[in-house]
Amino acid sequence: MLRSPLHDLHIELGAKMGPFAGFEMPLWYPSKIVAEHKHTRSQASLFDISHMGQASIVGEDSATELEGLIPTDLKSLPLHRMHYCCFTAENGGILDDLVIACLGQDYFVVMNAARKEHDLNHLRTNIKNSAVLEHTENALIALQGPKATEVLRRLTPEICDLQFMTMGDFAIRGVPCIVSRSGYTGEDGFEISMAAETAMKLAKDLLNEPEVMPAGLGARDSLRLEAGLRLYGQDMDTTTTPVEAGIQWTISKSRRTDGARPGGFPGSDVILEQLTNGANRRFVGMLPQGRAPVRTGTEICLEDGETIGRVTSGLVAPSVGAPIAMGYIDRDYASPGTQISLLLRGKHVPAEVIRLPFVKHRYQNTVKIQSNSSGGKSNV
């Protein structure tokens, strides 16, 4: 089993370790999942996400070749801007969701841990005129929460000029980093890539800040679910299209039927037809009555017992104080306010379809720096 560059730190902090995507990763720390979750919503938490894939696509044809695999307009993506994208299959299904950042003619890609090897093989098989360079030498951490900006303002104030879904090169306490204003919690925050040998120093420096505590993958999952963010392999896969999954905004206007460069990506016929006429099922949020958690695979039913969908993710949400769930439902019953039932242990539990997210996103597009402290130089 692989280990993160921060493995020894997790052990030192008393983390409960477990397997994830071939890595031994921290699931939670002695404070446990709920405390880590609530701390992220109110302060700032540090997550180790070094198991995720990082790669650069290098070459003057990078944008053209990548656009052959995704329905996103990369050629119009500004320098240092990032876009949430998905690899599509010939049947219109989703091979993976990922983030791609523009570095000029080159692109920086962050992939899901469980699909990293698949994605790298997919890129290398289909990209012929550009180089695919995996960054196995880098660690990746995420500082998430409403106090994340205050923490980094003290260390490197220039970072706070980043807008949501932008990135740049910085130095934090002398450690060279690639920093993006992004995350997977619904909170304002930053993801920081650095050389593996410098990760321990930077992580300890951040944990020494009074607002910051460590958080594991358990809290990361509950946070993303409250934020209505999909998890690949659970909320979407090769059997679900971007339209069904409710991420049709990843399909750029220029790549749509009436766009300047329509189609040209795998499954475009299926996906563009669904954009025009709608999909037969839709991804929705659900608020069940009672206190029982709703698990993956739970049937979604009408009052007469007819099955109209299935739950893909669910839990008792710490910020909501009640069970929440997400899943796919027949489009005739997907409107917010629709009353449904969930089949839990043989009993029908009433629930209501709601518009996602369960907890409002708090991404920041602009933040004014109110500090005169010195920090590293930005190359943005």
Image (cartoon, helix red, strand yellow):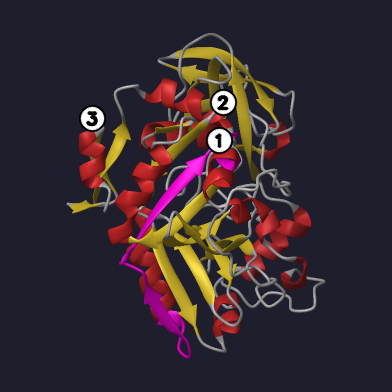
Name the residue furthest left. 1
Q: Are marks 2 and 1 in contact (CB under 8 Å)?
A: yes
Q: Which mark is residue 222?
A: none
SS for callout 2:
helix
- The residue that disc 2 covers is 42
User: In the figure, is residue 49 to the left or right of 273?
Assistant: left
Work out whether mark 1 precedes mark 3 in sequence or the reverse, and give the earlier one.
Answer: 3
Q: Which mark is residue 14?
A: 3
Give the residue drawn at x 51%, y 30%: 40
Real-space CA distance between mark 2 and mark 3, rounded to the nearest whole angstrom: 23 Å
Q: Which stretch is magenta?
A: 125-149
User: In the figure, is residue 198 to the left or right of 38?
Assistant: left
Vertical order, 312 against 21 (above or below): above
- The residue that disc 1 covers is 145
Q: Which of 89/216 is in front?
A: 216
Give the residue drawn at x 48%, y 91%: 129
Q: Which of 158/5 is in front?
A: 158
- Tell me the amino acid under the disc marked 1: Gly
Q: Position of residue 66 (x, y in %)?
A: 55, 77
